[in-house]
């Protein structure tokens, strides 16, 4: 019974320890979906707002619910299927009450699907270990496979203390829902446009992150970026031509976590599990040409979406827009309401 109480109290402390949302910059555009220079932004996104998936249309600012989950549930990390009809996302279900039979209850996430226009949520894959989570899905170009991060935890059965933790990249068959481990000690998979490679991150337990590329045919991997000045690299995305990787990173001096999922709750103090000094970066797939984009706004655990000319950043300050070819220019706010959890461009 003591173990049940311990974990219940732990979860309560975690919930209370979440960082307070950072405020939006004082300089905001005159109208929603308009840059400071008066350029109208016409885009549609699926974003996470208040732990639900929401369709956000610019320049109107219209919001349409995609999911309408129960209060105890949540959504994050949306990923659009190649046919544009379905969203995969990390779905947090209702946390069961601790018991002697199941003392270790955690707010874990499964891999779920929902129609892009809204509808019933279907759980595609749930890890067989109830304390583990599935996060950061990415579709193969043919729509037959979803790659995702498996976040695993091991507890001491006597004391209830965390013994070990880690990540792996799974390949999940969409038709059958079966999963195989593809990459040990990897997270945040991103599929190349031709479907032959995965970009992913690997972070040691002393917060030393690496950006790598995995060849699906040969099973080999190579390092693209290993920078000791960074404490976290997350959520890489490929350019359409497959030559550049865009990602978000936090400097080693900023409180940050190596995961946007459960592991950050156990591996960092709650007060420093988030930081607002994240930056958007880009680098050639060959490891050359690293550039950091200037920012004039604090960004906490940001996620990005790409067009041919722009980078859109979703975080607490709101929706920011960078010109892809102008890393020295700060972003412009195009929607002054934001949240954590993810963004994806919709057709």
Image: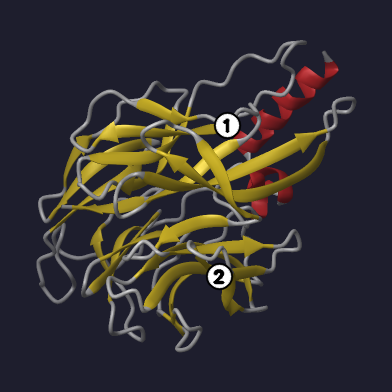
* Residue at the spot 30% in from the left edge and 64% down from the top edge: 320
Dividing the picture into quadrants, the one containing residue 252 is bottom right
- Relative to residue 284, is residue 188 depicted above or below? above
Residue at mark 2: 212
The colour scheme of the drawn protein is: secondary structure
Q: Is residue 340 visible?
A: no
- Say which label, 1 or 2, has the lower sequence index: 1
Q: Quadrant of the N terminus?
A: top right
How packed mark 2 is, by other alpha carbons closer than 10 Å (few <14, some 14-19, many 20 or more), is many
- Residue toward you, 205 or 275: 205
Q: Is residue 221 visible?
A: yes
Dot 2: element: strand
Q: Position of residue 12 (x, y in %)?
A: 65, 29
- Residue toward you, 308 or 58: 308
Determine the residue located farthest toward the front in the rendered image: 218
Label annotation for residue 127:
1
Q: Position of residue 284 (x, y in %)?
A: 43, 82
* Residue at the spot 30% in from the left edge and 26% down from the top edge: 68
Left or right of 158: which side holds 278? left
- Residue toward you, 254 or 289: 289
- Residue toward you, 105 or 302: 105
Q: Position of residue 204 (x, y in %)?
A: 72, 62
Q: Position of residue 156 (x, y in %)?
A: 85, 32
* Residue at the spot 32% in from the left edge and 65% down from the top edge: 193
């Amino acid at each position: 019974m003591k173990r049940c109480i311990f974990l219940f109290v732990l979860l309560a402390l975690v919930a209370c320890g979440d960082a307070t949302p950072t405020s939006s910059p004082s300089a905001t555009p005159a109208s929603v979906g308009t840059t400071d220079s008066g350029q109208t932004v016409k885009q549609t996104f699926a974003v996470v707002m208040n732990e639900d998936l929401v369709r956000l249309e610019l320049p109107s600012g219209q919001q349409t619910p995609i999911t309408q989950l129960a209060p105890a549930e949540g959504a994050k990390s949306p990923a659009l299927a190649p046919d544009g009809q379905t969203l995969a996302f990390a779905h947090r279900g209702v946390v069961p009450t601790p018991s002697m039979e199941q003392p270790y209850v955690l707010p874990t996430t499964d891999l779920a699907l929902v129609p892009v226009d809204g509808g019933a949520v279907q759980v595609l894959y749930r890890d067989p270990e109830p304390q583990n989570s599935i996060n950061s899905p990415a579709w193969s170009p043919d729509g037959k496979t979803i790659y995702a991060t498996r976040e695993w935890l091991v507890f001491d059965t006597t004391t209830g203390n965390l013994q070990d933790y880690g990540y792996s990249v799974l390949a999940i068959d969409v038709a059958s829902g079966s999963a195989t481990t593809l990459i040990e000690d990897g997270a945040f998979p991103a599929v190349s446009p031709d479907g032959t490679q995965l970009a992913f991150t690997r972070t040691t337990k002393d917060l030393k992150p690496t950006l790598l590329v995995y060849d699906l045919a040969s099973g080999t991997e190579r390092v693209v970026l290993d920078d000791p000045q960074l404490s976290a690299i997350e959520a890489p995305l490929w350019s359409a031509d497959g030559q550049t990787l865009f990602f978000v990173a936090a400097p080693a001096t900023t409180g940050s976590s190596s995961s946007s999922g459960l592991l950050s709750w156990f591996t960092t103090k709650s007060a420093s599990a988030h930081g607002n000094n994240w930056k958007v970066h880009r680098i050639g797939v060959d490891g050359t040409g690293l550039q950091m984009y200037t920012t004039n706004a604090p960004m906490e655990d940001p996620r990005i979406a790409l067009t041919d000319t722009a980078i859109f950043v979703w975080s607490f300050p709101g929706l920011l827009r960078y010109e892809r070819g102008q890393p020295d220019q700060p972003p412009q706010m195009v929607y002054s309401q934001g949240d954590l959890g993810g963004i994806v461009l919709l057709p």
